[in-house]
Image: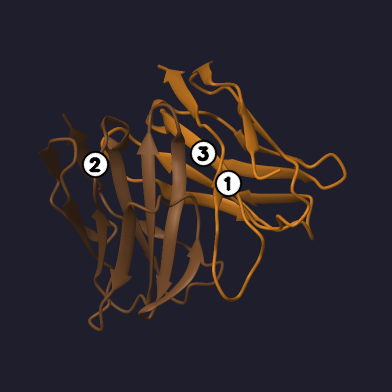
Chain colours: A orange, B brown
Amino acid sequence: QQQVKQSPQSLIVQKGGISIINCAYENTAFDYFPWYQQFPGKGPALLIAIRPDVSEKKEGRFTISFNKSAKQFSLHIMDSQPGDSATYFCAATPWDNYGQNFVFGPGTRLSVLP
Amino acid sequence: DSGVTQTPKHLITATGQRVTLRCSPRSGDLSVYWYQQSLDQGLQFLIQYYNGEERAKGNILERFSAQQFPDLHSELNLSSLELGDSALYFCASSVDGATDTQYFGPGTRLTVL
């Protein structure tokens, strides 16, 4: 129940295309869903996050879509650029003002071809 | 640069040994998190501290321990090391330890031979 599933494992997209990464969870206690971007040799960096009170959140070219009933959420990268080539992790945790216990998906390696 | 510093950058040691990884959070951040990233286990949350107090515990082995000091830096101690402990260890920090943005350090790569 603690697992977060993520697909695909790797993704190749042409420049200007749309990249879509999907995640699914089982634990209904999860109610905060961040996405992290990690470049080789660097630590992960928060990209965008959503809570289940909204079905979509957009920040620039990045959009999270959230389906609470299906317990699924996805990251859409519009107009994908070669600079977006990185590994993307979805994560989930209960919203807690005391402490956090994030569970991460296994990651998706995105390659955007020029 | 996230503002989180980790030392050392690389560490090579032998099985059965003990090592200490150090993390300095961003200025003003009270909470520190430790993560392990390996090829087979992915990114795993280990433990969180807030202002010196343990706040959340993830998949941290009993051979591992951590603490946060009064100056807010944190140390992760790994003992009785096994080959499978070889991984990247990341520290992250955030302002208040609730669900706010975590800033990750560059990581310490541990190799156990």
Question: Is A41 situated left or right of B40 in this image?
Answer: left
Q: How many marks?
A: 3
x and y percentages locating residue A64 in the rendered image: 66, 44
Q: Please, which chain is the residue tagged with disc 3 on?
A: A
Along the line of sight, which residue is nearer the eye, A34 or B15? B15
x and y percentages locating residue A10 in the rendered image: 51, 19
x and y percentages locating residue B79 in the rendered image: 24, 50
Question: Is A41 situated left or right of A108 in this image?
Answer: left
Along the line of sight, which residue is nearer the eye, A91 or A64? A91
Along the line of sight, which residue is nearer the eye, B87 or A92? B87
Q: Is the residue under label 3 in contact with that under label 1 (CB below 8 Å)? A: yes
Three-letter code for the amino acid on which mark 3 is drawn: Phe
For the C terminus of chain A, the image quarter is top left
Q: Is residue B90 visible?
A: yes
Q: Residue at x 49, y 35 (%)?
A: A88
Q: Nearer the viewer, mark 1 or mark 2?
A: 2
Which residue in the structure is indicated by mark 3? A89
Q: Residue at x 43, y 54 (%)?
A: B46
Three-letter code for the amino acid on which mark 1 is drawn: Ala
Which residue in the structure is indicated by mark 2? B81
How would you rate the neighbour count of disc 2 (Cα within 10 Å): few for under 14, some for 14-19, many for 20 or more?
many
Quarter of the image holding residue B36?
A: top left
Marks 1 and 2, how far apart at CA: 28 Å
At mark 2, the secondary structure is loop
Quarter of the image holding residue A96?
A: bottom right
